Image: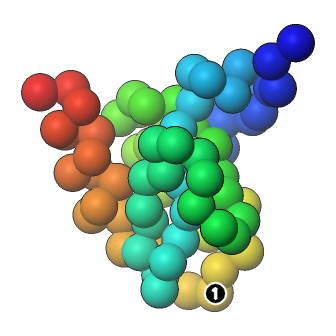
Amino acid sequence: MEPVRTCVGCRTRAPRSSLLRVVAIDSVLIPDGRASMPGRGAWVHETSECVDTAIRRRAFVRALRVPGPLDTQTIEQYLQRTKG
C-alpha cells in the first residue's frame, strides 16, 4: 500500500507518487523530485493551481514552519519547465 499525503494547495489526500515534495533552504522553496532532501517537506500537486493556492494561503510557510516569507521563484520556474 502506497503512502498517502495531503496537498498543501487543495488540501486533498493523494498517493505520494502523484505529489511533489517541496523543502525550504535559506527561505527559498526548492522542489524535491526524489523526495530525499533533508528537512521538513511539504507536498503539493504539480499544477500551477495548487502551487498558486498554497502560496496565496501561505500554506508553505505554515507546513515548513519557517519564519517570514519564502522565495517562490524556483518552484514556479520548475513548474514552467515541466509543463513546457
Q: Quadrant of the N terminus?
A: top right
Number of residue marks:
1
How far across and how far down the image is residue 11, in percent? 71, 33
Q: Residue at x 63, y 87 (%)?
A: 67
Disc 1, SS? loop
**Vertical order, 55 against 19 (above or below):** below
Q: Residue at x 28, y 39 (%)?
A: 79
Q: Decide which of 76, 2 is in the foreground and name it.
A: 2
In this rendering, position of residue 78 left or right of residue 44: left
In this rendering, position of residue 24 left or right of residue 8: left
In this rendering, position of residue 16 left or right of residue 32: right
**Vertical order, 23 against 44 (above or below):** below
Q: Amino acid at mark 1?
A: Pro
Residue farthest to the top, as pictured = 1
Q: Residue at x 69, y 28 (%)?
A: 16
Q: Is residue 15 visible?
A: yes
In this rendering, position of residue 73 left or right of residue 26: left
Q: Quadrant of the C terminus?
A: top left
Q: Decide which of 53, 45 is in the foreground and name it.
A: 45
How far across and how far down the image is residue 61, in percent? 62, 69
How far across and how far down the image is residue 56, in percent? 48, 55
How far across and how far down the image is residue 76, in percent? 28, 51
Q: Is residue 53 visible?
A: no
Residue farthest to the right, as pictured = 1
Q: Residue at x 21, y 26 (%)?
A: 83
Q: Which residue is mark 1?
A: 67
Mark 1 burial class by Cα count in 10 Å: few <14, some 14-19, many 20+: few
Q: Decide which of 50, 29 is in the foreground and name it.
A: 29
